[in-house]
Image: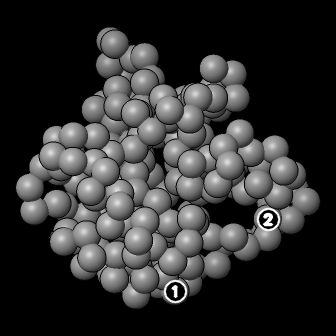
Amino acid sequence: MDPDHPVPWFPAWGVRFAEPIANIFSVVSVFNEWRPSNRWLLASYDSLASEVHLWSAWYAMRVAESSGEMVAKTPDAEFIRLVSGTHQINKAFERAGLAVGDERAWVVFLPDFEIGEGFAEFEIPRSTYNEKNADAERLVEQLGTTLITRRPIPTQAGLERIGADYSEGISSSMMEGSFISHMALSNLR
């Protein structure tokens, strides 16, 4: 990780399946059997855009979790809902969950450290990613996947996957902000 990067790496590991997903249930069943808690999730590869996008979704999830105002019953589902920009859990998993034909995904861990009273009143520990790496590697192995040595990047395909309506396209300089803006819609629709 670059020490000059504005935020630490989010605990997310890109994975590639040996072949495109034919049965989502079988993949999710293995994942659920081996994940240490519901703070671990699988997300579609294109739905996650950047470290800032991930930490923003995580922060919104932790605020809702801490205040008892989550729409979903579990942190993993709430995170997927926020990333998807929808109030509907089923639609959220259609957008940011796994789909038949997916070849890549993200294994994600949602830290549960305290966030403080105000937005700038906590510091994200830079060790968060490394502390969960062994658990992530075990999940990667159980899924029969291989690690992708790449961090999340915003793409037009990702915006389309999460249901953002940018039919005329958007410049690459505006793309990360578009993912974050779309996330803000999660409590409106």
Residue furthest top as drawn: 168
Q: Position of residue 3 (x, y in %)?
A: 50, 77
One can see residue 188 in this view: yes
Which of the numbered marks, if any, corresponds to residue 131?
1
* Secondary-structure class at tag 2: loop
Q: Quadrant of residue 181?
A: top right
Distance of label 2 from label 1 (alpha carbons): 18 Å
Q: Quadrant of residue 125?
A: bottom right
Above or below: residue 77 compared with residue 135: above
* Crowding at mark 2 (Cα within 10 Å: few <14, some 14-19, many 20+): some
Q: Residue at x 82, y 58 (%)?
A: 66
Above or below: residue 117 compared with residue 159: below
Amino acid at pointer 1: Glu
Residue furthest left as drawn: 19
Classify residue 186 as left or right of residue 21.
right
* Crowding at mark 1 (Cα within 10 Å: few <14, some 14-19, many 20+): few
- Per the image, the residue denoted by label 2 is 115
- Colour mapping: one colour
Classify residue 78 as left or right of residue 4.
right
Instruction: Tell which circle, 2 or 1, labels the residue nearer the N-terminal end.
Output: 2
* Secondary-structure class at tag 1: helix
Circles 2, 1 touching at the beta carbon (< 8 Å): no
Front in this rendered view, residue 67 or 51: 67
Q: Position of residue 47 (x, y in %)?
A: 39, 42
